[in-house]
Image: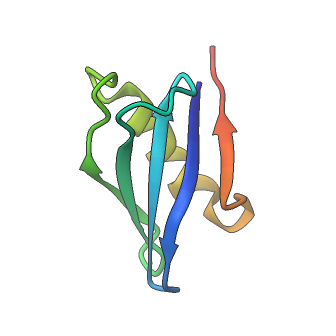
């Protein structure tokens, strides 16, 4: 599970913090280019050793940006 919140969205780029397993300690950061619909990692969360959580968030952003709320949770199994 990865929780995320939008820190900034100027209409061109959104910057989101993400939280591994809901922990507020040492979040990571992801950028999303709205015009090209591409996500990129800014900073890996300390608990995200293999960038698994960042990757889940980036795929969700690229696939579902138009329907995603500013803050939320992504779950998988």
Looking at the image, the residue that sits furthest to the front is 25
* Residue 2 placement: quadrant: top right
Residue 22, horizontal then vertical, whole percent: 57, 27
Colour scheme = rainbow
Residue at (35, 35) in percent of width and height? 26
Q: Quadrant of the C terminus?
A: top right
Q: Please say if 11 is above or below 65.
A: below
Q: Quadrant of residue 38?
A: bottom left
- Residue 64, given in percent of the width and then of the height, sits at 64, 56
x, y percentage for residue 17? 45, 50
- Identify the residue at the far top of this view: 77
Q: 3 left or right of 26? A: right
* Quadrant that contains the N terminus: top right
Where residue 45 appears, x then y in whole percent?
Answer: 32, 34
Q: Nearer the viewer, residue 23 or 54?
A: 23
Number of numbered discs: 0
Looking at this view, name the residue that lies furthest to the bottom.
11
Please give the name of the residue rendered at 25% of the width and 47% of the height, measured from the top-left corner: 43
Q: Image height check: is 69 above or below 72?
A: below
Q: Residue at x 74, y 62 (%)?
A: 67
The image quadrant that residue 47 belongs to is: top left
The answer to whether residue 17 is left or right of residue 63 is left
Residue plotted at (46% across, 81% down): 35
* Nearer to us in this view, 25 or 37: 25
């Amino acid at each position: 599970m990865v929780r995320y919140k939008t820190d900034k969205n100027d209409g061109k780029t959104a910057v989101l913090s993400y939280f591994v397993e809901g922990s507020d300690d040492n979040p990571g950061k992801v950028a999303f280019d709205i015009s090209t619909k591409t996500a990129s990692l800014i900073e890996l969360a300390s608990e995200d050793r293999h960038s698994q959580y960042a990757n889940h968030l980036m795929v969700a952003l690229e696939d579902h940006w138009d329907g995603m709320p500013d803050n939320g949770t992504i779950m998988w199994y």
